[in-house]
Amino acid sequence: MTGVVVAAGVAVVLLVIVWQLRGIGRSDHPVRRGIQALVLVAGVFVLVFAGCYHLMSTVDRSAFTEPLDFADAVYLAVTVFATVGFGDIAPVTTSARMVVTAQMCGDVLLVGGVARLVVHAVRTRRRQVGGGAD
């Protein structure tokens, strides 16, 4: 079940990325739209994993070092995304460790790959509108 939820969440993130890239390509203010895209995609990504962590903790209260309510799940997702890793909440079960590992891999792809795609889309659109649009 966890794998299905993670896959659905990743699909949502991919749809948001495509939607935002298309929006940048039509925007009169591609820089602003690019910043908006990065913030939105990162936010959706974090919330998707927070939802997975909360669901996992609800189904199996021993999945993490402590049971997670949604706020705790958001906190965990943000600390993993920011690579802070305070250590106060950690995955215990194999499935929880795999989902956290998937988020870590996704973090790298998101920061590197999506940022690059957005910057490319912004530059392309700025050239199309004459370079002066912000």
Image (spheres, rainbow, N blue to C red):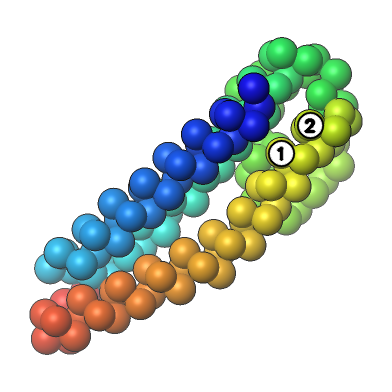
Estimate the x, y position of residue 119 in percent, counting from the top left: 38, 75
* 128 or 89, nearer to the observer: 128
Residue 37 seen: yes
Local SS, label 2:
helix
Q: For residue 36, which numbered disc appears in the image? A: none
Residue 43 seen: no
Estimate the x, y position of residue 59 in percent, counting from the top left: 71, 13
Quadrant of the frame with the C terminus = bottom left
Name which residue type carries label 2.
Ser
Residue 124 horizontal side relative to residue 42, left or right: left
Identify the residue at horizontal 20%, vertical 76% (top origin). 125
Residue 91 horizontal side relative to residue 114, left or right: right
Seen in the picture, residue 62 relative to 21 is either above or below; the reply is above
Determine whether label 2 and label 1 are within 8 Å by CB. yes
Identify the residue at horizontal 68%, vertical 56% (top origin). 105
* 35 or 45, nearer to the observer: 45
Local SS, label 1:
helix
Estimate the x, y position of residue 20 in percent, counting from the top left: 30, 55
* 14 or 87, nearer to the observer: 14
Identify the residue at horizontal 15%, vertical 64% (top origin). 26
Q: Cα distance, mark 2 to mark 1? A: 6 Å
Identify the residue at horizontal 82%, vertical 24% (top origin). 63
Seen in the picture, residue 19 relative to 70 is either above or below; the reply is below
Residue 27 horizontal side relative to residue 61, left or right: left
- From the image, tell me which residue sits under label 2: 95
Q: Residues within 10 Å of mark 1 (few under 14, many from 20)?
A: some
* 78 or 45, nearer to the observer: 45
Q: Residues within 10 Å of mark 2 (few under 14, many from 20)?
A: some
Q: Quadrant of residue 25?
A: bottom left
- From the image, tell me which residue sits under label 1: 99
